[in-house]
């Protein structure tokens, strides 16, 4: 066992809580500071690919996750208007055989609850809510956090997991400019029993169209379908996950789309909408004994479904580095950064590139669309785009 450290994590999202679990399991003393006054179960679906589930299994979370995940059998791509379908790749047993770990669909709130309960089982008072950090200082190899309520907290290491609007990032570096992508996402959850039987499958589907795309996959053991529809819109700007829309407004944004799409939209209880904003990934994450992880340093558009997976990978690698370089926290954080920046930057860039692929104007022509699917989602191209993501094993990555 390496030397135990006192570690402060700012942000109780997926990245912050996964990091807390990994560190607590290795004997470190962790306190998580969350600005929200209550930890709710917000959001919709997440995709946990093999590179993420591999970490969660190593942390002993497969059993508690079993009750909330839906394991995918395969993913497919479909033409927006005709429904012509091509299999994207097999998952299920194939993911376990090829990549050594499963591919899961999970509701963000369910996943967050599992993480939160695991943290508090390890240390009941680990999470402090209503604790907004105003600033930090590093003096004589100690981190001092100053909370807005006047409290002061000291630690050996500071990890900023406070998301895309990270206050710690703003203190450490010049925050990257937010650039509106010209895309608006609509999301909603659907009771599976309201849908045609053809749509009640443990399958992820990506409907691609000339100016938008729709992603669907099941959640909560197949009881619920998650829908996210992304459409080009150069006017709307509100970056919020909780802006309410209507079924009528949502349906009007997808004219001419397949009847299945319209049926799914009409079955949503309450659709929400938000503008997709891109930011350049930071080239540097760490200063001394303070570092960033997750969306605080590499926010990404959702078109590779890797945002949560990147934060999970960050959590395991930062823990391994802190243990390996246990007498030199600054070296540990610097090495964590070195091992992560290139991969995360590549994911951010690849995700942005997928938006153009999903929205190609050629898809407006039904005959051309089928040939486009065959060309762009040919097996060799799919392997090139995805295998390097799923194969990555942060549990065994060499640290030196």
Image (cartoon, grey):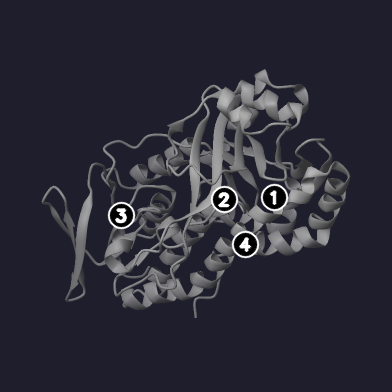
| Up-down relation of residue 193 to residue 279 (above or below) | above
The residue carrying pointer 1 sits among few (fewer than 14), some (14 to 19) or many (20 or more) residues within 10 Å by Cα, namely many
Tell me the residue at 47%/76% (across/down).
Answer: 338
Which of the two discs, 1 and 4, sits closer to the camera? 1
The residue where tag 2 is placed is 302
The residue where tag 3 is placed is 10
Which of the two discs, 3 and 2, sits closer to the camera? 2
Comparing 124 with 35, the one in front is 35
Report how far apart the C-alphas of labels 4 and 3 lie in the structure. 28 Å
Which of the two discs, 1 and 2, sits closer to the camera? 1
Mark earlier in primary sequence (1, 4):
4
Circle number at residue 350: 4
Mark earlier in primary sequence (4, 3):
3
The residue carrying pointer 4 sits among few (fewer than 14), some (14 to 19) or many (20 or more) residues within 10 Å by Cα, namely some
The residue where tag 1 is placed is 358
Report how far apart the C-alphas of labels 3 and 2 lie in the structure. 23 Å
Tell me the residue at 29%/41% (across/down).
Answer: 36
Tell me the residue at 75%/26% (across/down).
Answer: 259
Mark earlier in primary sequence (4, 2):
2
| Up-down relation of residue 65 to residue 247 (above or below) | below
Report how far apart the C-alphas of labels 1 and 4 lie in the structure. 12 Å
Q: Is residue 98 left or right of residue 154?
A: right
Report how far apart the C-alphas of labels 4 and 2 lie in the structure. 10 Å
Residue found at the far left of this picture: 150
Residue 291 in percent (x, y) is at 35, 67
Q: How many marks?
A: 4
Disc 2 is placed on an element classified as loop
């Amino acid at each position: 066992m390496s030397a135990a450290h006192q570690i402060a994590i700012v942000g109780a999202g997926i990245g912050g809580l996964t990091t807390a679990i990994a560190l607590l399991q290795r004997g470190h003393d962790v306190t998580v500071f969350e600005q929200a006054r209550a930890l709710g179960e917000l959001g919709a679906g997440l995709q946990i690919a093999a590179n993420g589930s591999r970490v969660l299994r190593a942390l002993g979370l497969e059993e508690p996750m079993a009750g909330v995940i839906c394991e995918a059998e395969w993913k497919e791509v479909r033409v927006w208007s005709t429904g012509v379908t091509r299999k994207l790749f097999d998952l299920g047993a194939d993911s376990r055989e090829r990549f050594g770990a499963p591919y899961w669909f999970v509701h963000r709130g369910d996943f967050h609850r599992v993480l939160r309960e695991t943290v508090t089982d390890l240390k009941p008072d680990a999470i402090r809510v209503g604790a907004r950090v105003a600033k930090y200082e590093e003096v004589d190899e100690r981190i001092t956090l100053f909370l807005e309520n006047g409290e002061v907290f000291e630690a050996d290491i500071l990890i900023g997991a406070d998301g895309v609007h990270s206050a710690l990032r703003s203190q450490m570096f010049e925050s990257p400019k937010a650039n509106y992508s010209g895309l608006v996402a609509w999301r909603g959850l659907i009771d599976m029993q309201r849908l045609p039987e053809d749509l009640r499958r443990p399958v992820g589907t990506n409907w691609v169209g000339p100016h938008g795309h729709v992603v669907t996959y099941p959640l909560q053991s197949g009881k619920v379908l998650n829908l996210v529809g992304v459409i080009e819109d150069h006017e709307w700007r509100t970056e919020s996950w909780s802006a309410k829309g209507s079924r009528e407004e949502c349906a009007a944004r997808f004219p001419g789309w397949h009847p299945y799409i319209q049926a799914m939209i009409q079955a949503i209880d309450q659709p929400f909408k938000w503008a997709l904003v891109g930011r350049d990934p930071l080239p540097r994450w760490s200063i001394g004994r303070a570092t960033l992880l997750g969306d605080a340093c590499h926010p990404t558009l959702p078109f590779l479904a890797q945002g949560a997976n990147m934060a999970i990978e960050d959590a395991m690698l930062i823990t391994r580095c802190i243990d390996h370089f246990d007498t030199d926290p600054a070296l540990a954080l610097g090495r964590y950064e070195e091992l992560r920046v290139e991969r995360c930057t590549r994911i951010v860039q690849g995700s942005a590139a997928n938006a153009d692929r999903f929205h190609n104007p050629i898809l407006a022509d039904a005959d051309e669309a089928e040939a486009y699917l065959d060309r762009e989602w040919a097996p060799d191209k799919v392997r090139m785009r995805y295998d390097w993501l799923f194969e990555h094993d942060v549990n065994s990555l060499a640290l030196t």
